[in-house]
Amino acid sequence: MKILVPVKRVVDFNVKIRVKADGTGVDLANVKMSMNPFDEIAIEEAIRLKEAGKAEEIIAVSIGPQKAQETIRTALAMGADRGILIKCDDEVEPLAVAKLLKGVVDAEKPDIVILGKQAIDDDSNQTGQMLSALLGWPQGTFASKLELDGGKARVTREIDGGLQTILLNMPCIITTDLRLNEPRYASLPNIMKAKKKPLDEKTAEDYGVDITPRLKVLETVEPATREAGEILATPEDLVEKLKTQAGVI
Ligand code: AMP
């Protein structure tokens, strides 16, 4: 069984985002970039399936600039077998990403694609669902548990108010939620070994996909800064403020 895991290079989750002075987007100059955290969970899940003898090969694919190679190398150091970089210098929107991934699926014929539920830079939460629609494959989104048995995938999903379990025919699309697993760190020997693992380079033209953006960003602004809190001496002071300032009682 083959597993395909799309991994996106995004601003590291610890970085405090700065908006460019002219408001045209987020400032990426000298900013630490990492693998999208939900994609680390997807890679970890694929590795666990391989370790359990349920998968033979894990392919990590990234769509992005040359530097997205580093993200693929991280996936290879964690335990993926080979990588594919689809080189695109500009931001690629979820629909174009999904079309490119469909091209990879048609060429590689994986049994499962495990994506993150969302990329933490655009927060779109669209790519897995769009890929599922383009392929006509069933989807198990926001998975917090995944079990494979007899050509079927049993997926426990986190939904409002509880957990839902669904049974999917394979091939299928899975998207990962935070509680699916805790991703491992790559060891130094594995980081060295990853340098020798195969990494193919492709372009959007290789898959015949037009990646021209369909959306136009009109403005990017910093969130409003929160006002400092105030410590009050007595409950009476609080009641007074709720009456006179907040006007809620
Ligand atoms: P999104 O729909 O943008 O929130 O992304 C959901 C998931 O799609 C991510 O967690 C990745 O698994 C995958 N994905 C999105 N964009 C890319 C990209 N440029 N390269 C590789 N995978 C991507």
Image: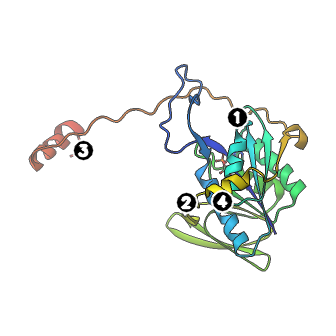
Tell me the kind of residue under disc 4.
Ala
Q: Position of residue 172 (x, y in %)?
A: 77, 65
Q: Which residue is mark 1?
A: 91
Assess whether mark 4 and mark 1 are in contact (beta carbons under 8 angstroms). Answer: no
Dot 4 falls on a residue whose secondary structure is: helix
Residue at 58% from the left image edge and 65% from the top image edge: 180
Residue at 70% from the left image edge and 41% from the top image edge: 68
Query: Could you tell whether 18 is left or right of 155 in the image?
Result: left
Give the image quarter of residue 39.
Answer: bottom right
Q: Which residue is mark 4?
A: 42
> Looking at the image, can residue 82 be seen?
yes
Badge number at residue 178: 2
> Between tags 3 and 2, which lies in front?
2
CB of mark 1 near ligand 1 (< 8 Å)? no
Tell me the kind of residue under disc 3.
Val
Q: Which residue is mark 3?
A: 248
Which residue, as the protein is rendered here, is positioned at the far top? 22
Q: Position of residue 146 (x, y in %)?
A: 65, 71
Query: Gap between marks 1 and 4, in whole Å?
Result: 22 Å
